[in-house]
Image (cartoon, rainbow, N blue to C red):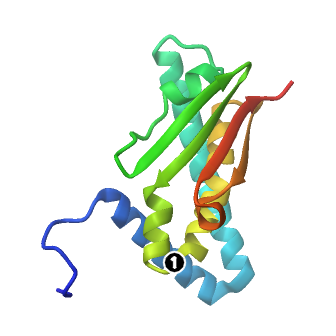
Amino acid sequence: MGENESADPVSWATLFCRLFAHISKEVCDKFGEEGEQAIKDGVWAFGIERGKNIAERAKANGCDINVESYLSNYDMGRADDFTAQNTYGENQVEQLFTECGFARQWIEDGMEKYGKLYCDMIDPAIAKGYCENLECIHDRRVYEDGVCSFCFRMKK
């Protein structure tokens, strides 16, 4: 065990990030751009599946499939390593993440190249899986901007 390592177990998020980064790195190293696209396609399929499950959860909870029900029926709990402020507007919700445990882990591990493959695909895919008319605009990322900014809105 290294000097700075604790004997405590790591979080599920840390393990997820490390597994994703190592698998992505191997695929990208072996298959180049085609491998990178395969990772993106896999993340997209995962996101679509999650979005459909969120929609089913919303329906089971008696909610309409709309912007207001999207986050309240989300499938992933927010731990302390994810801090977001939600601002609701007409047919949209904006999220500003000041803390993202996933991005922080990938940066700490020097694996942000692979984390970006996940981050660029996952939220637009979840939104689309939840509702064909829900779009996700992800205009700022922790990697470049220190925060992540999303706008989820229903297309007219």
Quarter of the image with the N terminus in it:
bottom left
Residue name at image x 61 percent, y 89 percent: 30
Mark 1 — residue? Answer: 111
| Residue 80 location (% of width, % of height) | 34, 47
Callout 1 crowding tier (Cα within 10 Å): few <14, some 14–19, many ≥20? many
Q: Mark 1: which amino acid?
A: Met
| Residue 66 location (% of width, % of height) | 66, 20
Quarter of the image with the C terminus in it:
top right
| Residue 88 location (% of width, % of height) | 63, 24
* Residue 10 visible within the image: yes
Relative to 41, 46 lies left or right: left
Quadrant of the rendered structure where residue 37 is? bottom right
Against 67, residue 103 (above or below) is below
Against 10, residue 100 (above or below) is above
Q: Residue furthest top?
A: 62
Count of residue discs: 1
Quadrant of the rendered structure where residue 41 is? bottom right
* Residue 132 visible within the image: no
Against 144, residue 82 (above or below) is above
Residue name at image x 35 percent, y 45 percent: 79
| Residue 8 location (% of width, % of height) | 15, 67
Q: Residue furthest right?
A: 156
